[in-house]
Image (cartoon, rainbow, N blue to C red):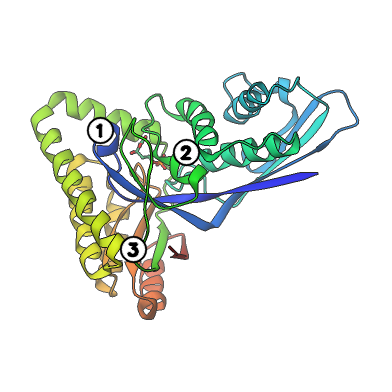
Amino acid sequence: MTSASAPGKAILCGEHAVVYGRPALAVPIEDVRARATVEPHEADELHLHAPAMEFDGPLQAAAQDQPLRRAIELTLTEIEVETPSLRIEVQSNLPIAAGLGSGAAVSVALIRALSEHFEVPLPPQRQSELAFEVEKLHHGTPSGIDNTVIAYGQPVAFIRGAPPDLLKLGAPFHLLLADSGQSAPTALAVAGVRERRQQDYETYQALFDQVADISVKARAALEQGDTATLGPLLNRNQDCLQQIGVSTPELEALVAAAREAGARGAKLTGAGMGGFMLALVDETAVQEVEQALLRAGATRVLHTRVTP
Ligand code: PMV
């Protein structure tokens, strides 16, 4: 039996702008993970058990464009293994359609478990490339940031189409991740931005340029371990996201509550229109901000320490 896992992720800044070539920063979230287990199966079929995705049956019964099926088939082709007698189980405690990279984490966990099971381990770059193919099923034009940060498992400065630039954090920092409780398919949010950008190109270009400036400065702050500078940059990024049209009253309420309770900065994370927000907090403020987020309507709050 072979088991492998992959972390979730949070985009610190640059979501949406990254689709249009601007830089973005993302970090792995080690406390929430997808896990895949591969073991021999008596029956002559590949059996997939994925309770979180409500699938249990032969892989062939899944739609051809089902992301788990695609991840499994791509990996078997990559490592040149014929469809074998296998039982694959996928478990994940990552919220789905919430901006924490659930889809990419499940893909990377599957790619790792299968390739390790057949003793053809793949390097992070190849894991990322295969997961990117699967990401295209979730929404047509992914930037590739999710699969990159999750496959490398390190903080990354990401520009679409460029090799990943792995970051050395100057110091660990604490994030609170709060669920707005609204589910938010990335494809819808990305399509909405594309439509609005077509109608008002200049405004959106200017907004994306502002986000790029924020990402560049935030990168320097991260590398210096300077959360006093990073916090206000996250707030500025949230202003841009609000103008880009992907925030919601629920997310705004959580962002305001976090700031009032002492967070250094707060913003939505991921595609928006719901899903999660993040707050940068000093360790001493974790409890107070967490309570404030719950009072402001968060359906759950995760605390994570991002380490160099
Ligand atoms: O919500 P998520 O985790 O799928 O993140 C999407 C990030 C976007 O920038 C909105 C889209 C992308 O492909 O980068």
Question: Residue lying farthest left?
Answer: 202
Q: Name the residue: 27% across, 47% down.
A: 247
Q: Is residue 139 above or below residue 92?
A: above
Residue 158: x and y in percent read 33, 42
Q: Is residue 33 above or below residue 284?
A: above
If the picture is divided into quarters, which one holds ligand 1? top left
Tell me the mark number nearer the camera, choosing from 3 and 2.
Answer: 2
Question: Residue lying farthest bottom?
Answer: 284
Q: Quadrant of residue 236?
A: bottom left
Residue 198: x and y in percent read 17, 23
Q: Secondary structure at mark 1?
A: loop
- Real-space Cα separation, disc 3 to disc 2, in angstroms: 23 Å
Residue 284: x and y in percent read 37, 81
Camera-nearest residue between 237 and 169 = 169
- Real-space Cα separation, disc 2 to disc 1, in angstroms: 16 Å
Residue 146: x and y in percent read 43, 41
Q: Amino acid at mark 3?
A: Ala
Q: Is residue 226 above or below residue 219?
A: below
Which residue position is annotated with label 1? 21
Camera-nearest residue between 277 and 133 = 133
Who comes first in sequence, dot 3 or dot 1?
1
Who comes first in sequence, dot 2 or dot 1?
1
* Mark 2 residue CB less than 8 A from any atom of ligand 1: no
Locate the C terminus by quadrant: bottom left
The disc at residue 279 is 3
Q: Is residue 305 left or right of residue 196?
A: right
Q: Name the residue: 40% across, 64% down.
A: 176
Q: Is residue 2 left or right of residue 200?
A: right
The disc at residue 147 is 2
Q: Name the residue: 71% across, 21% down.
A: 61
Q: Is residue 262 above or below residue 178?
A: below
Who comes first in sequence, dot 3 or dot 2?
2
